[in-house]
Image (spheres, rainbow, N blue to C red):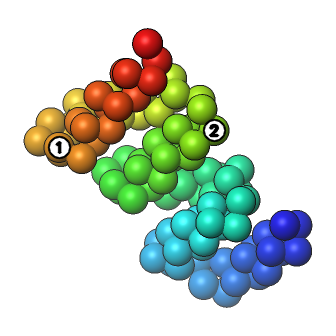
Amino acid sequence: TVYVAEILDRFLAQRGDRGSRLRVAQRAASFGLNDYSLKIFKSLQAENPNDFEAVWGMIDYYQFTKNYQPALELAKQWLANHPSDSTVANKLSELELLLK
């Protein structure tokens, strides 16, 4: 997995645009490089708090790692600014059930 992360780092050094970074984060997660993907999702969200894919990737990471509280907080923050987002509202309900 270290080798894959090195390859992805080299790719991002050449192509660091949002779309490339998002694809790398998603691909890294599929390779089991969850912390690597989280780092990219966090940087994307820091640049644009309204980046749905970045926030969703972080929520997905926290749920996958059974760290439900940060996922719940991200979903709540997102819904405070995007109250009509039914996808995140459904995810919030799911997370609340997991925390019971």
Q: Quadrant of residue 64?
A: top right
**Secondary structure category for the residue under label 1:** helix
Residue 48, how many percent across, how many down?
39, 54
Q: Is residue 17 above or below residue 14?
A: above
- 42 sits left or right of 92 in the view: right
Q: Residue at x 60, y 71 (%)?
A: 27
Name the disc covering residue 71, or none. none
Q: Nearer the viewer, residue 83 or 44?
A: 83
Residue 78, how many percent across, how many down?
30, 38
Q: Residue at x 79, y 70 (%)?
A: 5
Q: Is residue 71 above or below residue 7?
A: above
Give the mark nearest the N terminus, 2 or 1.
Answer: 2
**Secondary structure category for the residue under label 2:** loop
Query: Which residue bears the numbered disc 1?
Result: 86
Q: Quadrant of residue 93?
A: top left
Q: Nearer the viewer, residue 68 or 74?
A: 68
Residue, far bottom: 14
Residue 71 visible here: yes
Name the disc covering residue 65, or none. 2
Cα gap from disc 2 to disc 1, whole angstroms: 23 Å
Q: Is residue 26 above or below residue 83?
A: below
The C terminus is located in which quarter? top left
Q: Residue at x 40, y 28 (%)?
A: 95
- 28 sits left or right of 82 in the view: right
> Could you tell me the amino acid type at mark 2?
Thr
Graded by Cα atoms within 10 Å as few (under 14), some (14 to 19) or many (20 or more), the crowding at tag 2 reads few
> Could you tell me the amino acid type at mark 1?
Ser
Residue 76, how many percent across, how many down?
32, 28
Q: Residue at x 80, y 74 (%)?
A: 4
